[in-house]
Amino acid sequence: MKMKKMVMSLLLGATLAAGSAVCGAEGIDWITPQDMSLGGVEPGMSLSYVESIYGPMQEVKSHHVDHLLGYGDTVKIVPSADGTSVKAVLVKGNNGWATPAGVTVGMDASILQKIYGTGEVDPTKHKARRMPGYDYYTYWQAGDPLHYLTFAVKDGKIAYIKVGLMQR
C-alpha cells in the first residue's frame, strides 16, 4: 500500500511539473536556430566572414550604441564586445535583406503570425524612450533564449527587423 501511494505521488508530481512548464511558456513562440538570421548574417558569425560576403562595412554613428557598423542607411551591425563577431543585425529598409522565411521590411504585419506565431507582443517597449508608435513582436530561439528575432511594426507594416544575442 505504501508503494502504491509513493508511485501515485510521483506521478502526480511529474504531471504537475509538466503542466507548469507548459503554462510557463504560454504566449511565447519559440523558433528554430535556422530562423535566426537576416540576409544570411546571424549573431555569433565572425565580422570577417560577413565582410567576405558583403564587402567592407562602414562605421556608423549612433546615439544608442558606442560602436556600430553597417551597409548604407538600412543595415546596421552591432559587433560583440571583443569586436570580432556579430552581436545583432538591424535592417530598416526594404533592401533585399530578409529572414530565412522571406520576411522583409515593408511587408504586412499579418505575415508574422502566419509564419512565426503570435510572438511576444510588447506594445510599451521603447515607446517612452525612443520609438513612439511602434509595436514589437519578439520570437525567441528554442534551446537558447538569449537569441531573439524582433519585428517593429508601425501602421500595420514591418518597419524594421532585428536579430540578436543578448549579453550572457
Image: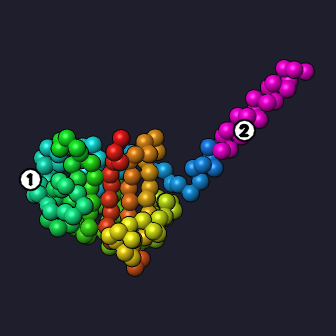
Residue at image coords 14%, 43%: 48
What mark, if any, has residue 56 been given in the picture?
1
Q: Please name the amino acid that badge 2 sits on.
A: Thr
The image's mark for residue 133 is none
Residue 148 lies left or right of residue 16; in this view the side is: left
Q: Is residue 41 magenta?
A: no
Q: In which quarter of the image is the C terminus?
A: top left
Name the residue at the right extreme. 1
Q: x and y percent of residue 108 in the render? A: 40, 74
Q: What element carries label 1?
A: loop
Which corner quadrant holds the N terminus? Answer: top right
Residue 2 appearing in the image: yes
For marks 1 and 2 on the same chain, the one whose residue lies earlier in the sequence: 2
Which residue is located at x 49 percent, y 60 percent?
120
The x and y percentages for residue 79 are 21, 49
Q: Distance between the residues labelled 1 and 2?
A: 54 Å
> In x, y percent, where is residue 116?
46, 58
Q: Helix, strand, or loop for circle 2?
A: helix
For the point 62% across and 47% down, which residue is it?
A: 22
Quarter occupied by residue 69:
bottom left
Residue type beneath disc 1 = Pro
Q: Determine whether, in the image, residue 164 is placed left or right of residue 60.
A: right
Read off the residue under disc 2: 15
Magenta span = 1-20
x 46%, y 69%: residue: 123
20 over 153 or under it: above or below: above
